[in-house]
Amino acid sequence: MSVSSLSDRLAQHIHAWAARTSLGRAGLSEKAPLAWLIAPSPANLGFALRTTFAALLALSLALWMELDSPQWAAMTTWIVAQNSRGQSMSKAKWRLIGTCLGAIAGIAFLAAFPQEPWLLFPLLALGAGACCAEATFLRNFRSYALVLVAFTCTIIVLSGANQPDNVFMIAMSRTTYITLGIVCESTLAGLFAPRLQTVAHEEIRSRMQEALSGACLSMTGLLLGEKDGLFRSRALIGSIPSLADQIEFSEIEIGPHAHIGDHARAVLASISTFLARGLSLHIHMQAAAPLPETFEKSLSDFAQILKTIPERLTTETDLVAAARQIRADLYHTRTNCLQTATDTLILFEQARSHPNSSEQLMRNLLESRILETALAKLILELDEAVQHFLATLEPGTKDHFHFAQHIEKDPVLAINNGLRAAVGICVGGLIWESRRGRTGLRWPCLWLSPAPAFPLLKILF
């Protein structure tokens, strides 16, 4: 049999297997038991094969370099690997930073207190507690890096306890196989990630479309008094922080020079304010019932625009033109609201100066003025969201927009996390030294040696 005929038969078998797999997936639900194993999607299968090959490559190189713990190179590859390329790059970056800082801290701790465990453990506990407390104030893999500082520092101190003269080599060894695993995973992931910027831009666009469409549908139900409007609004507000986190990873894939991520975060911020103002207006409308006729007309016009926005964002081919037309419609509606509010204010001032004006008339005019102004502010928030969404579709070369994020900080949770880590290390050090005192060993006995302590440290951090 010739080589060409063998390759042709092999290609036919692969094509037939792919066809059977696709037919099998057509009738298999993604929620079926073991669907991920029986009929994995091409993306998941490629991710598994790529990561497995990267782990084997990292392990082979670590064995060839004769590192003391080569399994950590392969483990790092699996730890860093993520389905999203942006997530992998971010996690690899912060894991490398955390490992290097932890290695430096471990050398410094053991060099400062080589034979003083009663000083070493309290200071080590304070350092780990401070890292865990500060990590509570950060998001995504930045907090992961701070926790890794404490984790790596503790492992290096424990590993070098019986041989403090070799602590530098222990730290260098750990940093080497962590770096090796990161390099192998990043290299293979970069080779199998074509059109990375285009795909990331499309992901941001689709997420913003879904967020805007969901906000418009929720607000329509909320303003028209539908039952599910309130629940939709609350659910969408709760999902916005996770959407903002995903934008950061897509922004990494696009590159550092674009400001698409800043505009996308501004879209989500405007949507949050839009929904919050909508909830406030909904409560005010219930308290002011029956609503003034002029406000009902403005509310009906705005609700009609809200109903058409999701369809216009998904069905029209020219999305930029659709977004501009939506902004024009919102501007027209907002102008009418402000004009109505101004006319109502004039009528209110005239009624107040007239001695025979009834209190009910003045109340209706005042309520109409307040509601029209609130509706105009609501429209303005949606217009700002569409404006920033338009900026993500047409990124400008001279765009220097920056969205400042203000992360909510919980000092109580930070103190709890820091104390838990510090107390855990202090109690472990106390048991360690108590056992050493009874056995007469210079450092902990076998059952408290660094190797069995690794799983405990992973659980702790």
Image (cartoon, helix red, strand yellow):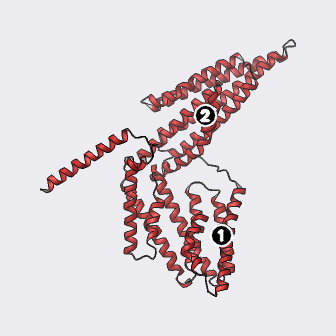
**Residue at image coords 65%, 32%:** 230
* Residue topped by disc 2: 232
> For residue 444, which numbered disc appears in the image?
none
Looking at the rendering, in which quadrant would you find the N terminus? bottom left
* Residue topped by disc 1: 127
Residue 310: x, y in percent? 52, 29
Q: Tag 1: Cα neighbours inside 10 Å, few (<14), some, or many (≥20)? A: many
Task: Verify CB contact (< 8 Å) between mark 1 and mark 2.
Answer: no
**Residue at image coords 62%, 20%:** 300
Looking at the rendering, in which quadrant would you find the C terminus? bottom right
Q: Tag 2: Cα neighbours inside 10 Å, few (<14), some, or many (≥20)? A: some
Identify the residue at the far bottom of this view: 440
**Is residue 253 in view?**
yes
Q: How many marks?
A: 2
Residue type of the residue flagged with mark 2: Arg
Label 1 or label 2, whichever lies nearer to me, is 2
With 115 as the anchor, is 176 left or right in this view?
A: left
Cα distance in 3D space between marks 1 and 2? 44 Å
**Residue at image coords 73%, 23%:** 369
SS category of the residue bearing label 2: helix
Residue 261: x, y in percent? 52, 46
SS category of the residue bearing label 1: helix
Above or below, comparing residue 118 to residue 41 in the picture: below
Residue 348: x, y in percent? 78, 19
Residue 148: x, y in percent? 57, 65
> Is 433 or 294 nearer to us in this picture?
433
> Is 28 or 178 nearer to us in this picture?
28
Residue type of the residue flagged with mark 1: Gly
**Residue at image coords 43%, 40%:** 29
Above or below, comparing residue 313 to residue 49 in the picture: above
Circle nearer the N terminus (1, 2)? 1
